Amino acid sequence: MTALGELCLLTAFVASGYAAFAGLAGRSGNHPVLRSGALWAAVCAALALAATVAVLTWALVARDFRFQYVADYSDNLLPWHYALSALWVGQAGSLLVWAWFLAVLSLAFRLWPGNAAGELREPAFGLLMAYLCFLVAVMVFGADPMLPSVAPPAKGSGLSPLLQHPVMLVHPPIIFLGYAAWSVPFALAVAALLTTRVAGAERRGCEMGTELPPDASGEGERRTATTRPHFATSERCPSRGGTREAITTSPCTDIRHTECAGYDRLDAAWAKAARPWALFAWVVLGSGILLGAQWAYEVLGWGGYWSWDPVENGSLVPWLTGTALIHCLMAWKCAGVLKRTALGLALATFGLCNFATFLTRSGIFGSLHEFSRSPIGWLFLALMLAIALGGIALMVWRRSMLVPQRRISSIGSREAMICLGVLALVLLAVAALAGTTAAPLSRILLGRTIVVGQPFYNNVLVPTGLCLLAAMAAVPLLRWNASPSLSQKRLLLVAASAAVLAGIGAFAAGVRHPIALAVAGLATLSLVAPLAVLVGQVFNLPDPNGKLETCPTAGLLARYRRQYAGFLIHCGFACLAVGVTGSSLGTQRHELTMTRGETVAWTGRSILYVDLIEHELPDKLVVHAQLEISQEGTKPYVLLPAQVLYRSQNTWGTEVAIHSTWSEDFYTILHAGEGRETVNLTLIASPMVRWMWLAGWIGAAGAVIGLWPNRRHTPASARSVGSNGPALQRPHWTRAPQHQDAAHD
Amino acid sequence: MTTGRKLALAGIVVVSVTGYMAYLGASSSWQYYLTAEECLAHAADLSHGRIRVCGTIATGSLRISQDHREASFALEAGAGQLAVTCTGLLPDNLAERIDVVVEGRLDEACVLRGEKVLTRCASKYKSRAAAGATPDAAPSGREIAT
């Protein structure tokens, strides 16, 4: 079987290499045979990798210790589902899963009918295949999952008990899927930078009214970038057909339909093509990170969920830059700004994914995690450096094409707030990166390793987090390319009043920390602002002296689905902020020794230690401490924190017991004890933790709604952006309809 | 003032505040992260501040008090050994021949007074052979972070 696996892996290597060559060469020479060959070679590579995964999976489930990988990461006592999870626990297996995901995503990118990449599809596909070839080459030459055991052992080393948790069945593959998905915006960016043609007018930027040269089709028609006063179009409710002149008349470029679109490949259409992949990668990687935090919280038994360790920062940093990228894409598409920033972030995010791999596989970072110390980490560092240098060179080379279509018109515009939010995200990413690399850099520069502690990260998180929250809260009530209208200002005032009331309410409830009060207010603003937008759209709020007109809520939600999906994600972020702030500032710990029958009062709870209970299981011995908790206003409940002896590893571990409510988690840890009479316990009361997990679900729901494809046959009236068809209903006081469409296409 | 300048000013404020906060955080929390061997070699320079030392617990050196709140052991440091004493809750899986990270201060007698002991988390990409505790041993404390 190892030979079959090796054969599959080599097939994938050769096929992905050919696909990369054919994809890139076929594009430049316009050879249909090469292009078709690239596709079939990619299919072959994906199938070969799937076969390799199948072989390793079978070996893990069957405990075939002739595979060195199986011997290293499983044993006979391991339940089958955790044996399956060993597929991505080891270095070679995780690379294999990553490569397989990349192959499948690349094919999806190439074949997806709704792919808006246009002419960039082929070169981007070639680049994806080149990256796949790199990953497979790393496996073939450096971390072979099919390596046979020199002397197959009778039993394997087993899987670390800490990794035997349901979350670990999904957390690592989700992270790798996220890494794989970030390669698509990168490939699109590089393909656009490499293949875009530069013409004279491009060097001047695509200004309004600029006469443009003939398009690539050679039709020779002279075109002019269009200026359309969106807000001057008639407003009407689609379900009622009524029309009403909008009061606001703020001329702005329809970025999506500017004639620049057919002119170079770095127009708003690029942003449209990159956005779904970036959003997909964002939600997948974010879910993976949050699942990892939940695993740390429930399994590691220290009462926290994030310790700014290099392995955590490694995945957080690309997620932060990716978040910034998604917002830059929106600003680019809708307001024609942040073009350079978006491309730079697309390159940086992918580079940082590779840097994260370097972090966890080079062994040079001081961490509480045990990392492999193989040379393959350095390959990823080399790749990251090549991406960084190549990306900078490409952007300098194509700088004339990266001139933004517009300038930010007002500090009160939506793009200005996005700009501030992007700055906060990038600052946080830079700080996390600086803290993570402080150790190796100080060793190189000073000869000694220096690490920074959590206060460094937390101190950075406070200003950047508040700035981010404030920008995010205000954005729904702002419009593109203009200051807020009078209606918007009024709604902003209402939302701000609600935020102030929330702050006062939090103060009355006993919250005294200024950061907690600020977060309470801003989080409320984040929740109220989208509601205000919805109310404004339902009632189609006119400016003063306008006529009140109502629209069905469901219709509006469906019509502006992607906009509200974005707002829903913002609500999730507000929940995350509440959870992080509450748990960071309000956590209380108490370490104590209890004797049997003793009752202790703490944080309003009465805690009774009843007894120590032992359970013999085939693979472990579990020793529970039975605690009965009573609290005024709630039903009494029992918690069973435990110590577990894992027989296979012959080591003890902790199983914490948590009673979770929306206001607070009560977290108990059983430590050492002598006999049944006394137990050593740590009690932790951690407020608002549940809000963080809720945030994950809300964010994921928002992303799924936002990514859901449009119906193929949209009525003509709904597609009439920039056409002569009927005008669309839009909230004139928020932004132009064309922009809404563009923002959420 | 143009919009660009207003934005630049806002950006400068955000960057400045963040930079200052980062400086405060770094200056209050930085530590040397050393191997036991480096700690022994530079002991004279390290007596004034908190340090973080990683190493492997030497065979036959581990002593744990009955209430599991005090321990002493030695970290392998090349040819020598670095003596360590710790108080507080100890990791459950504290045992000989495992890798630990000790945070604390080095006293004049070159003994590391640990305030926190962390066992390394067997994370992805690395398997870990069984070590330390025996089935008969009583459960021990553990503090571990990701």
Image: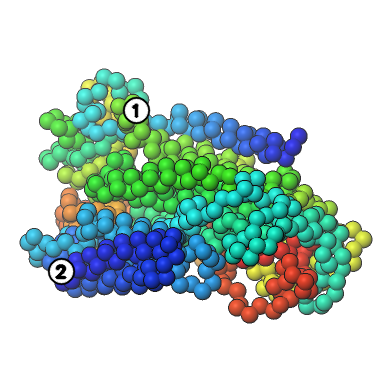
SS of the residue at dot 2?
helix
Residue A602: % across, % down: 47, 50
Residue type at mark 2 is Ala
**Whether residue A532 can be seen here:** no
Q: Which residue is mark 2?
A: A3
Q: Residue furthest right?
A: A545
Residue B64 appears left or right of A739: left
Badge 1 crowding class, 10 Å Cα cut-off, few under 14, some 14 to 19, many 20 or more, is few
Residue A163: % across, % down: 30, 59
Q: Marks 1 and 2: which is nearer the front? A: 2
Rendered view: B22 above or below B109 = below
Q: Assess whether mark 2 and mark 1 are in contact (beta carbons under 8 angstroms).
A: no
In-front residue for pair B70/A392: A392
**Residue at 19% from the left image edge and 73% from the top image edge:** A62
Q: In the rendered image, which quarter contains the N terminus of chain A? A: bottom left
Pinpoint the chain carrying mark 2: A
Pinpoint the chain carrying mark 1: A
Residue A121 appears left or right of B64: right
Badge 2 crowding class, 10 Å Cα cut-off, few under 14, some 14 to 19, many 20 or more, is few
Marks 1 and 2 share the same chain: yes
**Residue at 35% from the left image edge and 58% from the top image edge:** A130
The colour scheme is rainbow
Q: In the rendered image, which quarter contains the C terminus of chain A? A: bottom right
Q: CA distance from mark 1 to mark 2?
A: 46 Å
Residue A213: % across, % down: 65, 55
SS of the residue at dot 1?
helix
Residue type at mark 1 is Leu
Rendered view: A604 above or below A440 = below
Q: Which mark is residue A445?
A: 1
Residue B102: % across, % down: 29, 37
